Amino acid sequence: MEILSTSKNRLLALLPGEDLALLEANLHRVSLPFKSEIEAPNIPIESCYFLTEGIASVVASSKNGKRIEVGLIGREGVTGAAAILGSVSSPNATFMQVPGAGFRISAIDLRQAMERSRPLASILAKFVHSFMVQNGQTALVNGKATLEERLARWILMAHDRVETPNFSITHEFLAVMLGVRRPGVTTALHDLEGRGLIRSKRGEVIVLDRSGIEEVAGWSYGTAEAEYQRLYGRPSNSQSGVL
Amino acid sequence: MARFFFHVRDDKNYIQDDEGQELPDLDAARDEATVAARQLLSEALLQGNGLIDRQFEIADAQGVICAVVPFRHVVRFT
């Protein structure tokens, strides 16, 4: 039963049985509602979360209140890259922007398990690398892509991490992800909707035409996803996305 | 703080904002609409697209339109 549900996280699913057994006593199944705080800036990271559903957003911020999303994590990964690398805290914030669930483990227990299990240490190190590639792509896109390309990329990245064609997302968070003021998000979504690619309802986006959205995203989407696939292979059980 | 809704109107469409956002007052809502309009216009400008003449219609929590910010008013040529 336990093995069945941990396998919904791709990193845990890749662990050999004996290495997973090292972790299992310290993994606690948790539900993660909308806006749950996973990490706060410069506060010691207590726990890492292997997500099985939902999406966590990593957000960089400035002293004068500017914020932009630098990465997102779903069932393909784990939160707490800083803790995994041995840092106590990070200036970035992490919170759930699409509600979900996962397995919580204390950062101390995870570090101890990494010292005892080479496969675990290797799987997590590769994930942190793939996440840094994603962060790099996000920097590239925020500097060089249009708002429409960035929105299309973000919808594809969210779609990769959910089981269904629809997911809940507020315009408030989309504005943080895209680095624009919130009233502009309404217009950007409307433009994609007008081309029959999505439907945008109150607090929800429904993907209607994934390949059409990929066309809009163009060069801005795919590099980080290809790197993840190179490291871990293609999922056998993914319904919608590529992760 | 009060909740404001930023509906968008152009000659073809009316886009309803059904989420809204919390802001200190109407002046802050006008500022928010002004910056959002400038961001949307600058995107279109950089791509060499024609600028669509839209406007934000700012409504309060009761649905009453309390300010209109036409996109053309947020651009200044000197």
Image (cartoon, coloured by chain):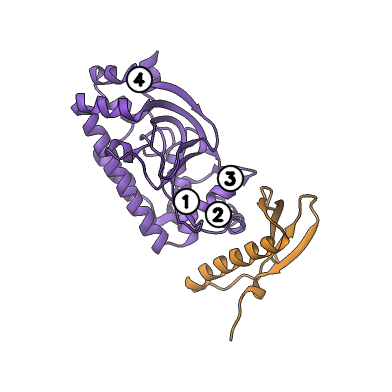
Q: In terms of sequence position, does the residue under pointer 4 or pointer 3 come before the other? A: 4
Q: Count the labels in the image.
A: 4
- What residue type is disc 4 on? Asn
Q: Which mark is residue A26?
A: 4
Q: Is residue A207 above or below residue A191?
A: above
Q: Which mark is residue A192?
A: 2
Q: Are marks 2 and 1 in contact (CB under 8 Å)?
A: yes
Q: Is residue A4 above or below residue A174?
A: above
Whole-number angstrom distance, CA of label 4 to CA of label 1: 40 Å
- What residue type is disc 2 on? Leu
Q: Tell me if mark 4 has few (under 14), some (14-19) or many (20+) residues whose alpha carbon lies within 10 angstroms of its own.
A: some
- What residue type is disc 1 on? Ile
Query: Which residue lies under the disc numbered 1?
Result: A213
Q: Nearer the viewer, residue A39 or A214?
A: A39
Residue lying furthest bottom in this view?
B78
Q: Is the same chain shared between marks 4 and 3?
A: yes
